[in-house]
Image (cartoon, rainbow, N blue to C red):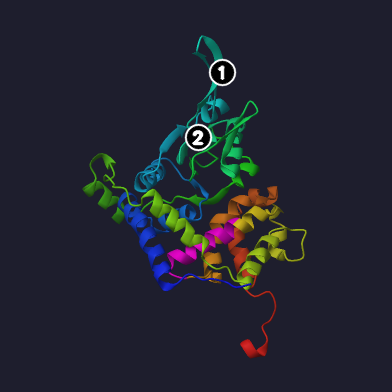
Amino acid sequence: MTVTMLGDAQVARGRELSGRVRSGLEQVLLGQADLIDLCLIALCARGHLLLEGLPGLGKTELVKALGRLLGLQFKRVQFTPDLLPGDITGGPILQEKDGQRQFVFSPGPLFANVVLADEINRASPKTQSALLEAMQERRVTVLGETHALPQPFFVLATQNPIELEGTYPLPEAQLDRFLFKVEVPGVDADVMTSILTGRRRGEPPVLAMALSAAELGELFALVDGVFLPQPVANYIARLVAATHPQRTECPPELQQGIRFGASPRAAIAIAEAARAAALLAGRPNVDFADVQRVAPAALAHRLVLQHTATLAGTSASALVRTLLAAVPVVGRPLPEAVR
């Protein structure tokens, strides 16, 4: 099979397009280069993003800024315990037309390109599950009738740490739909000083649109053109397989900590995110370093830990770091001729 790789001009174009969005996000969120990088990778990979952190760290402002920079239709849903599934998806309303009354579907806030699900874990699991079909298949089914969602479609959700009062853990099936789960850290004193002296009342700067719809489509096409070599694909597959404690590939130090490993959707997520990371780094093909860059954000939320590991204070992120250290990038020793 003939493989067509991106040329230098195409790679440079991809970096230029993504750089515009990065520049805008850096104006809004100061001192959060790693968070912005992962957000940009998720965007280029066309995946959904879950941001976890304490209130006041800028999660909502980051998502709102992304909507403005892309010039896409943006809607925000504030998740609360009394929110119902129909409040998100929409539903039929009775209207009179030509003297007859009939039910007409009224779209809910999901019908937008960028949907901010704010404090998603404050709603009941039933309402959280209303997003499953939308996130996976980009459509909504209400009373047996299917409605396609606008394209592109991104769910960017924020949640508070689940230990806080009034929060519900997200179901595993829904967590699996998020390409990345990223923890939003606090900022140091220098960054805080810049915010206090440069932003009255903490208001972020006004942003202009960075990419048109056509340019965003071009960026997606460039990411799709990034080549995934077979050894790198095999590395991704071995990483995901090693998260299952019943398999021989699982390192002994992980077998006691993990109850259920990651699904094939995790491998697909890592591959697509690694393609985006490679383009943003200026490469036409995926490298092992790209996989290691995105694997923690793509894997940690897909692992179900043993109760004993949770009680011992072991985090999924720590187990993923152990996994990356234990699984070699090459599955078997290389021949002498290529060492």
Q: Residues within 10 Å of mark 2 (few under 14, many from 20)?
A: many
Amino acid found under the numbered disc labelled 2: Leu
For residue 110, which numbered disc appears in the image? 2
Q: Residue furthest top?
A: 99
Residue 182 locus on image (x, y percent): 50, 51
Amino acid found under the numbered disc labelled 1: Phe
Q: Which residues are magenta?
A: 269-283
Q: How many labels were placed on the picture?
A: 2
Residue depicted at 54% across the width and 36% down the height: 121
Residue 293 locus on image (x, y percent): 51, 64
Query: Which label lies toward us, 2 or 1?
Result: 1
Residue 23 locus on image (x, y percent): 32, 56
- Quarter of the picture containing the N terminus is bottom right
Please name whichever residue, 278 or 35, is drawn nearer the observer in this view of the structure. Answer: 278
Residue depicted at 42% across the width and 67% down the height: 10
Q: Residues within 10 Å of mark 1 (few under 14, many from 20)?
A: few
First reached walking from the N terminus: tag 2 or tag 1: 1
Q: Secondary structure at mark 2?
A: loop
Q: Is residue 270 found left or right of 119 in the rendered image?
A: right
Q: Secondary structure at mark 1?
A: strand
**In this orientation, does residue 262 appear?**
no
Q: Is residue 265 found left or right of 15 in the rendered image?
A: right
- Quarter of the picture containing the C terminus is bottom right
Residue 123 occupies which quadrant of the picture? top right
Please name whichever residue, 223 or 82, is drawn nearer the observer in this view of the structure. Answer: 223
Residue depicted at 62% across the width and 47% down the height: 176
Q: Does the magenta portion include 232?
A: no
Residue under label 1, please give it. Answer: 103
Residue 175 occupies which quadrant of the picture? top right
Q: Does the magenta portion include 271?
A: yes
Residue 251 occupies which quadrant of the picture? bottom right
> Given contact means CB atoms under 8 Å apart, are the residues at marks 2 and 1 in contact?
no
